[in-house]
């Protein structure tokens, strides 16, 4: 194990993220429906609940690993990078889902050729 001196600010940052990850994981595992609603999921079925709990378990595991690695510079770096990769994947997934959600919403029809003239006539 590599026990070289760890940058205190980097260590504090990784541990703060780990604490947040643990809190989110606990919420996702033990209060799955409210946690998913807080993330913007209006309706949650059994599959959504299961996926929420899986993600919560993953966050708990990553947070606990970071706490366990808090005194090992190399291990803490690896866990921090793994957490960053997971978070980037989550952000991409949420971005794609939000885009699909917007595309699935009904749109107002584009104004037709008579719209401007009708609006113009109503002002006179």
Image: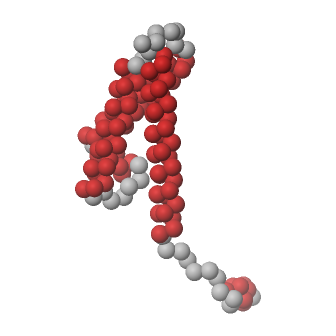
User: In terms of image quadrants, where is residue 118?
Assistant: bottom right
Left or right of 73 on screen, residue 119? right
Please give the name of the residue rendered at 51% of the width and 42% of the height, measured from the top-left corner.
88
- Where, quadrant-wise, is the N terminus in this rendering? top left
- Counting the numbered discs, the total is 0
Residue at left offset 51%, top offset 68%: 103
Residue that appears at 42% across and 17% down: 70
Quadrant in which the C terminus is drawn: bottom right
Instruction: Find residue 93 and report its horizontal and vertical position in percent.
Output: 47, 51
Residue 75 visible, this orientation: yes
Task: Work out whether 7 lies above or below 63.
Answer: above
Which residue sits furthest front? Answer: 1
Is any atom of residue 34 visible in this view? no
Compared with residue 114, is residue 102 higher up or lower down, i.e. above or below?
A: above
Please tell me which residue is depicted at 46% across the width and 9% down the height of the picture: 3
Position of residue 5 relative to residue 118, above or below, is above
Q: Position of residue 48 (x, y in %)?
A: 31, 54
Seen from the viewer's position, the closer of residues 121 and 110 is 110
Q: Quadrant of residue 59?
A: top left
> Horizontally, is 117 left or right of 65 in the view?
right
Provide residue 122's location: percent of width, then percent of height: 69, 87
Q: How is the image coloured?
A: secondary structure
Snapshot quadrant of residue 27? top left
Q: Position of residue 19 (x, y in %)?
A: 40, 27
In the displayed structure, would residue 71 be above or below residue 99? above
């Amino acid at each position: 194990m590599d026990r070289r001196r760890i940058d205190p600010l980097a260590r504090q940052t990784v541990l703060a993220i780990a604490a947040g990850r643990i809190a989110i994981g606990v919420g996702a595992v033990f209060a799955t429906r409210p946690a998913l609603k807080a993330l913007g999921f209006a309706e949650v079925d059994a599959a959504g609940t299961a996926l929420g709990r899986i993600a919560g378990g993953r966050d708990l595991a990553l947070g606990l690993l970071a706490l366990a690695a808090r005194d090992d510079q190399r291990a803490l770096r690896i866990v921090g990078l793994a957490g960053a990769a997971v978070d980037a994947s989550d952000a991409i997934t949420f971005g794609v889902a939000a885009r699909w959600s917007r595309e699935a919403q009904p749109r107002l029809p584009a104004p037709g050729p008579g719209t401007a003239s009708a609006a113009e006539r109503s002002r006179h």
